[in-house]
Image (tube, rainbow, N blue to C red):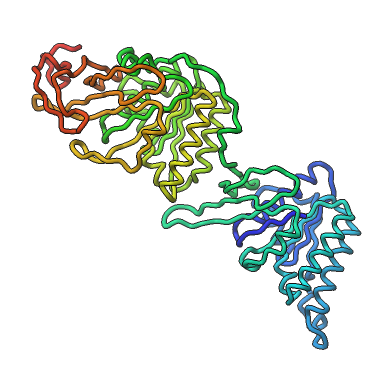
Amino acid sequence: MYLVEGTPGTGKTTLAMRFLLAGAALGETVLYITLAETEVELRAVGEAHGWSLDGVDLFEMVPPDGFGEDHEQTLLHPSEVELGETVRDIMAKVDKIRPARLVLDSLSELRLLAQSPIRYRRQILALKHFFSTRACTVLVLDDKGASGNDLQLHSIAHGVISLDQTLASFGAQRRRLHVVKMRQREFRGGYHDFEIERGGLCVYPRLVAADHTTRKSSEPVSTGSPELDALLGGGLVPGTATLFSGPAGVGKTTASIQCVEAALKRGEKASYFLFDERASTLLTRSTALGLDLQPHIDSGLLELRAIDPAEMSPGEFAGRIQEAVESGATMVAVDSLNAYLQAMPNEQFLIIQMHEMLSYLGQKGVVSLLILGLHGIAGDIRTDVDLSYLSDTVVQLRYFEALGEVRQAISVIKTRTARHERTIREFQIGSDGLRLGEPLNRFQGVLTGVPIFSGTRDTLMASQIDPESPRD
């Protein structure tokens, strides 16, 4: 006997229906006994999910005429008569149908009839003993709000699944479940996000990186730019996470798109999760930079998924990434972590979940590209959360001013897998993507956000706004 508890709207009936339909699909006899809902309501639930309940026996404990005066009595307390009659009716129906799977909805009605915790516990124990002798797997539903802190059912049931939902200040409600107990079985603890979709519950098990095997691969792959490969010490190493950080508009997305396109040209699959802008906008500006992604989307090599953080839970997002990796993606990009942070209720949970996710991607040998936007343009630049210690490689992009122009600089702060260049290079974004210039050796304070230029024009890349200047 297994207990499914949760407040109204968490999906108890949907889960119970899928449990019975799975049994009916195997040719088993299944029975749904309802003390709260009517058969019409249950069939409406099935119709909403596109189910046919023809193979499910539905039994209402309260008939349509059960509220007439003929069914009322005043000599005895209802708990002395109605509870016993209800339990006997349940047993009689089970003996008649002989189901292999049974759903009892819900125990809160029996609790109200019992009036006493002792009488209620005795009746539940009697039902448990009765079911155990009938070779019947039972799913009992209970309203968590009605039970309060009553843990009697937890001690009696073989397993307990708790469903709950939370409502944030903005966005859709978040549903999650956790397995409280499961006798003689190993189970994954903690909270698991889920959604109620047409057809049943879609559960996203909590991602545990230790459960996945390691794929050994350490040969660096190109970013699509020889200069950027040299700056990184050879390229991007599979199984590592690269963080592109910088202020708005500096070129973080362009750099990541160039890395993704290089992987696609090698025939590898990639997934790009977009939080900050629409997919159409990204495709348009990528094409203008000579990085046409549409053919790769049409061929199935690239999965471009625009995500609304107000609608997608963090558990579902982790599940989507896992699906992409299991389908063969060797490169995964998240643009950006700032929007992903807004989907999390607490920064602490973001750090823990990102650590588990990046560990999983590392175990699978996936190249991870992370984008983190910084607040401000120059000077004191801050970020919502520091994820640099979770990343194997950190690439910093910055603005600087020289000769009346706003220019961009790129540098690699750390790389755990190679000896990287410690220089600061200027870069430009043109119709051919990202182009890197020579090291900026006549600058001071570039990393502080307030650089001081002490060189000449020859030190810099050719200006994009001066048509007479020679191109690099």
131 and 54: which is toward the camera: 131
Residue 245: where, in percent of width, then height?
31, 32
Looking at the image, which residue sits at the far right? 96
Left or right placement of residue 417 versus residue 148 in this view: left
Lateral position of residue 353 relative to residue 84, left or right:
left
Task: Quarter of the image for the C terminus: give it.
Answer: top left
x, y percentage for residue 374?
A: 28, 38
Q: Quadrant of residue 308?
A: top left
Q: Is residue 47 above or below residue 210?
A: below
Q: How many marks?
A: 0
Q: Residue at x 86, y 55 (%)?
A: 132
Say if residue 297 shows up in the picture: no
Asked if one can make out residue 433 in the rendered structure from this viewpoint, the answer is yes
Picture residue at 91% right of the left edge, 59% below the top:
96
Above or below, 464 relative to 74: above
88 vs 419, left or right, is right
User: Against 78, is 387 above or below?
Assistant: above
Q: Image quadrant of residue 58? A: bottom right
* Residue 261 location (% of width, % of height): 41, 20
Give the residue at x 25% y 17%: 436
Left or right for 356, reference 334: right
Foreground residue among 214 and 78 = 214
Q: Residue furthest bottom?
A: 75
Location of residue 331 in the rendering, given as x and y in whole percent from the top left corner: 47, 24
